Amino acid sequence: MMNFDYVRPASVADAIAEASEKGATYLASGTNLLDLMKGGVSRPSRLVDVTRLPGLDRIEHLADGGLRIGALVRNADLAHDADFARNYPAIAEALLSGASAQLRNAATVGGNLMQRTRCAYFYDAGSACNRRWPGAGCDALKGENRLHAVLGWSEGCIATHPSDFCVPLVGLDAVVEIEGKGGRRELPLEALHRLPGETPERETALERGDLIVALRLPTEAKNFAGHSRYIKVRERTSYAFAVVSAAAALRIEDGKIREARLALGGVAAKPWRARGAEQVLAGAAPDAAVYREAARAALADAKPSGDNAFKIELAQRIVVRALTLAAAGTPDRIPALPGSPFSSVAGA
Amino acid sequence: MNLPISLTINGVRREIALDDPRVTLLDLLRERLDLTGTKKGCDRGQCGACTILVDGRRINSCLALAVSHDGAEIVTIEGVGRGDQLHPVQAAFIAHDGFQCGFCTPGQIMSGIGLIREGQAGDDPERVRECMSGNLCRCGAYQGITEAVLEAQADINAKNTAKQRRSA
């Protein structure tokens, strides 16, 4: 690991000033960053420790019925908050389907949003990677790429975004609050992560010094609490990243889907909102035929980036499964194996 | 760079002068404080052998910078028993053969203690397995580990209930 300066500012303004220098990066719990630094993939010259910044570790109920989650709230604390799990069950299930109990105890909300791809070529400092080294090329294109992107990829980068948490969040229109040199601004979470295009090294819309201070869920996000699931296929049942995942949230009234939200994970460089599929579902009766049509719409633009054509079919099946389970009703308690298609739930 | 930090480790407050910000809690414990019970397996947060309690919560000490944890209260495997009296999770691991080679065992025990404190698994073996998935055992002692955690949890909960009755 390359050596670095360590600073622990006392205020958000000081943190932004410290992080605005070239080579500086923010440190929260470090569960992803330290791993990347040990592998020589990240080489910051200064770590700006934000873990003691005041006021960023709170979950606040807003007057308009929305929810504001401080960037330093730990993943486990959010998932186990009884109110949160009741109002946003798909988000809680996604959180609990990710990583391990130890990592969830440490990892923060802001850090989860900022985690980097798990592409093995990005992680291997000896491989060519345009994300790490612009213009170097992409060894994944002709390498082991069965887990890589099928949507929104470019010849420059076929990596996927690893977060489970972000998938239901984009489905529920989460907003990111950012403090930077120019003051406070906000951004839909959907606009935070970028598709690779010609500039895969620009992973997010953040500028140097920008600090995520909170995540906000709009009032409407609670309307789906009765019919929400996050389903995730992994190569082992627990403690693995998604091969493909889907968050489905439905508002069902009088036997009809009034409104649907659908997002996919493991398919692109960002959590993927499937608006075309949502339009197919809106107004329809909840049945298998319409789920299949929605799944086709969600993957209509997909194409393999390598040895991964199977993910296009798999993603459609996971969409159908997530919609079927969501329509059957949110379980009273998150299943013993969160997100697992192997958890037995009535109606599946 | 001199970075003075203060940690309470197994109940004892320690003033530590770090000379390098790169030192993880794991390396601090093992290499500088001679607490080698906490094991280094993968050093990348994938195996759980380095699990310790920080402020009562189980985390991977290999992915935690010591300097960032100034002021923290840490419990390692060396701090869970009382003299010759084993912690209930330790005793249950012996009773249920929760290990073979023993390398992952300190991390498994710390993780089991953390799991019981979290109180999320209940008495469902599936939930215990899920909540212990951050600890790998290459000998494959998982059956015994699950039984040990369940038994220790029942034991601890029964003692706590008895304690509450006495104080009520």
Image: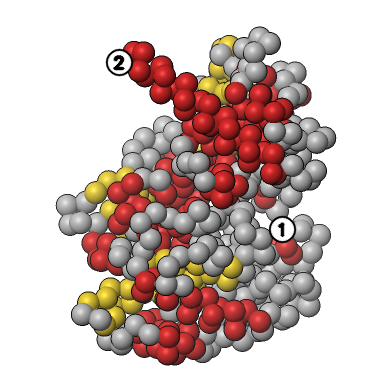
Q: CA distance from mark 2 to mark 1?
A: 56 Å
Crowding near pointer 2: few (<14 within 10 Å), some, many (20+)?
Answer: few
Q: Residue furthest top?
A: B83
What amino acid is at disc 2? Ala
Q: Nearer the viewer, residue A253 or A69?
A: A253
Question: What residue would you read off at disc 1?
Answer: A123
Percent position (x, y) of residue A95?
47, 54
Q: Is residue A278 above or below residue B147?
A: below
Q: Is residue A257 above or below residue A135?
A: below
Crowding near pointer 1: few (<14 within 10 Å), some, many (20+)?
Answer: some
Q: Nearer the viewer, residue A76 or A287?
A: A287
Q: Residue furthest left?
A: A63
The count of marks equals 2
What amino acid is at disc 1? Tyr
Q: Nearer the viewer, residue A141 or B109?
A: B109
Checking the image for residue B168, the label placed there is 2
